Amino acid sequence: MIGVFLLWAGLTLGGEAFSPEGIYGFARYLYDRCEYLRAAGEFQRYLFLAHPGPGKRDSVQLWIGLSYRKAREFERALRYFERVKGELKDEARYQTGLCYIYAGKYDTVAGWEEVGPRTAELVFAARLLRGQWERARSVLPQGGRWRELLRRGQNLPRKSLVLAGLLSAAIPGAGKAYCNRTWDGVYSLITIGAFVWQSYQGFRRKGGNSLRGWAFGIAGGIFYFGNIYGSVAAARLYNLDQWGRFRDEVLDMVGD
């Protein structure tokens, strides 16, 4: 009798696990465990087996889109968000905006005009990420943090590539110091100065035929022009770093 009961219980529980609702529960479990691609597959299997009504279908399609978005499969996520209708349509539109922003397609969201309060945050963020300060101001969400981000973006620290190059042309290493890379600047100054001094000593002793003078002079010239190029590159990297930090701040303000 015990053996028969255990067999019956196993079949019953197994049947529940493979029922549409069991599959749906398993999909939610996978999603909560951050196994997003497997979760998307189980949600799709649920749709195939259960043939739910419009409301439930919209909910499951939203879950599938969310799963793909979190797996960074943005194109696949967008296909499911587009299918969501009814009461969840606004949420699907918000998630669509997130897909575009996380994919770096800021222009798409920045161009949205008819938006609700929540979606307006995405439009604002996208316009910030495109440097469209005045257009961003037109959809400025409530809250001081958003206003602070706009102010930060408009006053983002920048270094001039031209000025960095000119400074290092005048004084080797000065351009790198201007870009907050003081020790690199000092190294460039000392290195180029050493080459110039050795070249000078060679020419002073043996005149224009000094092999030492020409060798150190040519090497010093190479380092000198490399120092100018490096200063311009340092300014570019500084600007990219500042923009990257700002972008991360904006992205931290949008999300699920």
Image (cartoon, rainbow, N blue to C red):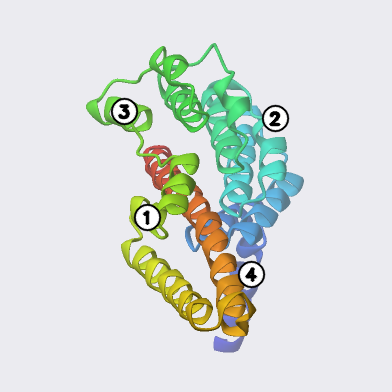
According to the image, label 4 marks what residue?
Answer: 14
According to the image, label 3 marks what residue?
Answer: 146
At x 70%, y 30%, the residue is 83
Looking at the rendered image, the disc whose residue lies closer to the viewer, 3 or 4, is 3
Residue placed most toward the observer, 148 or 227:
227
Residue placed most toward the observer, 62 or 57:
62
Looking at the rendered image, the disc whose residue lies closer to the viewer, 4 or 1, is 1
Specify few, some or many for label 4: CA neighbours under 10 Å numbering under 14, 14-19, or 20 or more.
few
At x 44%, y 24%, the residue is 124
According to the image, label 1 marks what residue?
Answer: 174
Specify few, some or many for label 2: CA neighbours under 10 Å numbering under 14, 14-19, or 20 or more.
some
According to the image, label 2 marks what residue?
Answer: 83
Q: Position of residue 33 (x, y in %)?
A: 49, 63
Q: Position of residue 42 (x, y in %)?
A: 67, 56
Q: Position of residue 56 (x, y in %)?
A: 60, 35
Q: CA distance from mark 3 to mark 4?
A: 51 Å
Type of the residue with mark 1: Ala
